[in-house]
Image (tube, rainbow, N blue to C red):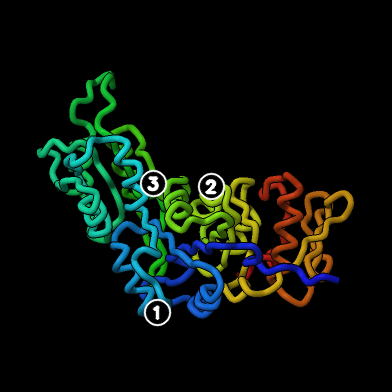
Amino acid sequence: MTEPATPLAGIDVVLADLDGVVYAGPHAIPFAVDSLNRAAESIRVGYITNNASRTDASVAGHLTDLGLTVAPSDVVTSPQAAMRLLVEQVPAGSRILVVGGDGLVDELQKHGFEVTRSAEDSPAAVVQGFAPDVGWTQLAEACFALNAGVTPDGDYAGIPWIATNTDWTIPQARGIAPGNGTLVSAVHTAVGRLPLVAGKPETPIFFEAIKRFEATTPLFIGDRLDTDILGANRAGIPAVLVLTGIDKAKQALAAGPEERPTFILEDLRQLHEPYPVTVFSKDKSQATVDGASVRIHGADVEIMAVGDDGINLLRAACAVIWASGRPIYGLNVPESLYLGR
């Protein structure tokens, strides 16, 4: 019998998210560095981040300090993807109001735009990204700029507004903190419209990475279903959900059709391990993955065999629940499928 292939089989470029995949705060996630270095021995590895607070050079430096070999050109940031959108919206050299940090300012200057922090400078667009020091003053300036010229009946839509990303949360060394999505939401509430979004789960950041690395068969690794996996699926890229960041087993079991990964890994060591095939019963009411078996009987999700590896039990449970077409809230799921994962 032929051994199952690893998730890396046939892949020419690995695209890895950062927060929750490679590191949490300043520290590397266990096994991530060694696993990515091993992959890089035969496959191009690039890095994608929605975090707009740092430049590609500073991200590359951080990754290098952790033990990876990374050049700035190996890092694709949401500000870089935002520039793809911005150049389609405003003339070259326009004045742009920035809400965010060095990552945004650096990319705007590289592309020849003039940077301002004040709505009184009549900016041609607003570009918003995360930075730890973003507060009310910066958000208010964005609102003033976006509302300029808008009539009470909304006849004028205002200047373009581009957000690097809309992640609700960001993992930090001390835990989970508010992300750029919460700040974008504050501006949205005040101005009554939504921005164009460059980062995950939208596709510009993925297309930027595909173009830069000349990828034909990429694989994306992420830790969030609603941004990483959804975005990769929208871009047509096979996706790995690794359970080292935001989303865990409970969220994977409940994933909607557009948020379901191709592979589920406990950590990045499993990139290099054979990924077992899922075998369904004829009516698809039962799924078996390498000795772990789960079935749906009525409204009950039942563990038929635990198997030797807990991750295979989760893979089997996800497979049978996803194949059922039934929402998770209509099923009785045993806690043992997700506790501790």
Q: Which residue is mark 1?
A: 66
Q: Position of residue 102 (x, y in %)?
A: 23, 59
Instruction: Report the residue that reaches farthest toward the front.
Output: 214
Q: Earlier in the sequence, mark 2 or mark 1?
A: 1
- Which image quarter holds the N terminus? bottom right
How far apart, in angstroms, are the residues tagged by discs 2 and 1?
Answer: 29 Å
* Corner quadrant of residue 238: bottom right
How far apart marks 2 and 3 lie (CA) works out to 13 Å
Image position of 1 with respect to 54: above or below: below
What residue is rendered at 20% in x and 47% in y? 112
Q: Tell me the quarter of the image containing the C terminus.
A: bottom right
Residue where numbered disc 2 is placed = 235
Question: To which quarter of the image does residue 302 belong?
Answer: bottom right
Determine contact: label 2, label 1, CB under 8 Å.
Answer: no
**Res. 99 visible in picture:** no
Q: Which residue is mark 3?
A: 198
Amino acid tagged 1: Leu
Q: Callout 1 environment at 10 Å: few (<14), some (14 to 19), or many (20+)?
A: some
Mark seen at residue 238: none
User: Are there few (<14), some (14-19), or many (20+) residues within 10 Å of tag 3?
Assistant: many
Q: Nearer the viewer, residue 144 or 332?
A: 144
